[in-house]
Amino acid sequence: MKTRKSIKKRFKITKTGKVLRRATGQDHFRAKKSGKKIRKTRKWVKLSKPLAKKIKKLLR
């Protein structure tokens, strides 16, 4: 099965097997968000187990 390249670019798998994604809300409407909220969106966010399982399947 081929790797989905679009998914490979959007997700990261850690050494322990966790699937990470970028936080939402980074692209536009940032002027109305507080600095704290903008700083929080820079970090990677862990996916839930059922979603992580689906993403891993597409990355095989």
Image (cartoon, rainbow, N blue to C red):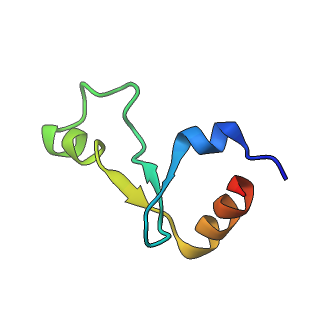
User: Where is the C terminus found, in terms of image quarters?
Assistant: bottom right
Place of residue 15 in the rendered image (x, y in percent of width and height, measured from the top left): 43, 66
Q: Residue at x 40, y 27 (%)?
A: 27
Quarter assignment of residue 10 = top right
Give 16 or 19, whichever is nearer the viewer: 16
Give 25 or 19, whichever is nearer the viewer: 19
Q: Is residue 19 left or right of residue 52?
A: left
Where 3 falls versus 18 (above or below)? above
Place of residue 32 in the rendered image (x, y in percent of width and height, measured from the top left): 25, 30
Where 25 falls versus 2 (above or below)? above
Place of residue 39 in the rendered image (x, y in percent of width and height, measured from the top left): 20, 42
Give 9 or 46, whichever is nearer the viewer: 9
Q: Residue at x 62, y 66 (%)?
A: 51
Q: Residue at x 56, y 75 (%)?
A: 49
Q: Residue at x 64, y 44 (%)?
A: 7
Q: Is residue 56 left or right of residue 15?
A: right
Q: In the displayed image of the protein, which residue is found farthest to the left?
A: 35
